Image: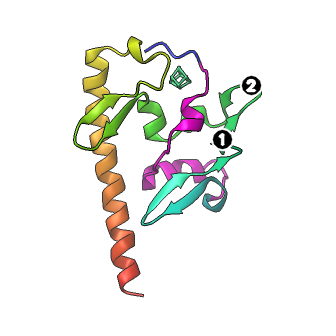
Amino acid sequence: MKCIRCGKCCSRTEIYLSSEDVARIEALGYDKKDFAVKSGPYLKLRKVDGYCFFFDPYEKTCEIYPYRPMSCRLYPVIYVLGKGPTVDAGCPMAYTVSKAELTRKGKLLEQHLSKIFKRAKRVYLASLQK
Ligand code: SF4
């Protein structure tokens, strides 16, 4: 795809985090309490003034771009319940995503979501034991 770095995906999306995403970002020195929020058994990227915690609204850049969460890497391919991997029409460059890219990113997204669900299951089961 051809990203024009408009930053829309850094404000309008909800990015769920895997354990690998969290570990990669924590290794940079960030505290999970600062960049992530709980959503039931899940962890999501925190928003500040409507934008991702790591988004610089002036430069329109991501402060951790090489280390960004997997869902950010795969965007604008998103997962829609009942439909599967889909190109998000909210991205102004959605039309530049090829069928091959959708297929490739869709497979990676399903693997990523599977890890997120496994982590959420562990968190949920641990909560039952408290
Ligand atoms: S919304 Fe699309 S074009 Fe804009 S920054 Fe995100 S991926 Fe790039």
- Residue 125: image location, x then y, percent: 33, 76
Q: Is residue 8 above or below residue 110?
A: above
- Residue where numbered disc 2 is placed: 59
**Which part of the image, by quadrant, shows the C terminus?**
bottom left
Residue type of the residue flagged with mark 2: Glu
Residue at 31% over, 39% down: 80
Residue at 66% over, 53% down: 30
**Residue 129 is inside the magenta segment:** no
Q: Is residue 108 left or right of residue 47?
A: left
Q: Label for residue 9?
A: none
Residue at 48% over, 35% down: 72
Q: Earlier in the sequence, mark 2 or mark 1?
A: 1
* Residue in the foreground of this view, choosing between 56 and 25: 56
Q: Which element carries disc 1, helix, strand or loop?
A: loop
Residue at 59% over, 32% down: 65
Q: Residues within 10 Å of mark 2 (few under 14, many from 20)?
A: few
Give the mark count. 2
Query: In which quadrant of the rendered view does residue 61 lie?
Result: top right
Q: Is residue 43 above or below residue 92?
A: below
Q: Is residue 60 above or below residue 30?
A: above
The magenta span reads 5-31
Q: Is residue 62 left or right of residue 121?
A: right
- Residue where numbered disc 1 is placed: 54
Distance from mark 2 CB to nearest ligand 1 atom below 8 Å: no
- Residue 20: image location, x then y, percent: 44, 51
Residue type of the residue flagged with mark 1: Phe
- Residue 21: image location, x then y, percent: 48, 48
Q: Is residue 12 above or below residue 94?
A: below
- Residue 76: image location, x then y, percent: 42, 27
Q: Is residue 8 left or right of residue 43?
A: right
